[in-house]
Amino acid sequence: MLSIESTELLTGACISGDYWDFDELINAIYEVIGDENRYYDYQGARHRVLGVCFDLRHAAKGEKNIELVTNGIHRGILKSHDLIVPEKNVYFSVEILWPELLFTTLALNDFITLHNEMIDDSLWNIHISVIRKFQSSVADCLKNHLAEEHYTVFSQLMQNKSPKYFRYATQYVDLLNLEYINLSIEERKENLAAFAIRLLIEDESYLALKEEILATASITKNEIHELPLTMKYPEEIEW
């Protein structure tokens, strides 16, 4: 089972599990977000979600973090069943920045809504169930770091009608990531709720950025999500 815990410096959250946990989530996300031509006006959000899937896939290949986790086997079981098996399982993990992880979690709501409307509205859709469990784990981890009133506001905004990210300027997620990285741990504790809420409302900074991107896109003839920010991520992130 995937587990999600905040990193030591509250820079992001660490997603951990075995190979099959990662594989199940990745396949569920691919199934629900569809191919690149299915929901054209959500290409920015789709690419962003796929970016997180890319990190998850690399984690499942053992290219990120590896740890050994007890699996419940003990000497009594080994003796009673006359077995020789490992007492620990291999778990993989990867860190994702909080703004990035929250955007992915929220954007998946849009794709679930679209999938229900266009593909399959069954209550028993296994792929949606897998994604919902992942979203719940993220929300539960976030809840541990927010004041009750702040989490209540976030929850209420999150439950507003989807889709929320129609033709969204996903460069804003980069902006939030970079702002968040530059905070101290004390500032992260104080402002994590604000960053979460900023992903749910189109505040002045978002609107200004989108206006600037649209102006550039009208000249270059690019799609809105194709224009990168000039700001650079640090080569190393302290988690």
Image (cartoon, rainbow, N blue to C red):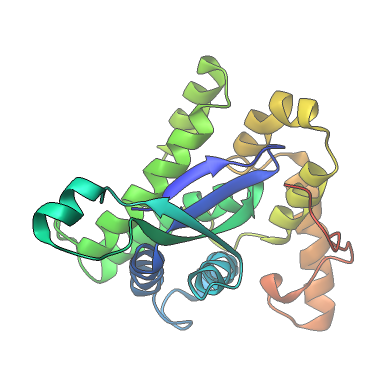
Using residue 196 as the reference point, say whether residue 21 is left or right of it: left
Which sits in the foreground, 24 or 149?
A: 24
Residue at 83%, 33% (x, y): give it.
184
Using residue 70 as the reference point, say whether residue 42 is left or right of it: right
How many numbered tags mark residues here? 0
Residue at 77%, 31% (x, y): give it.
185
Q: Quadrant of residue 159?
A: top left
Which sits in the foreground, 4 or 230?
A: 4
Residue at 51%, 53% (x, y): give it.
15
Using residue 175 as the reference point, say whether residue 98 is left or right of it: left
- Residue 199 lies, with reference to residue 190, above or below; the image says below
Residue 171 in view here? yes
Q: Residue 113 placed where, x, y %?
A: 34, 57
Q: Quadrant of residue 174?
A: bottom right
Residue 162 in view here? no
Residue at 78%, 74% (x, y): give it.
217
Q: Residue 142 placed where, x, y %?
A: 53, 34
Q: Residue 222 placed where, x, y %?
A: 74, 81
Q: Residue 143 placed where, x, y %?
A: 49, 28
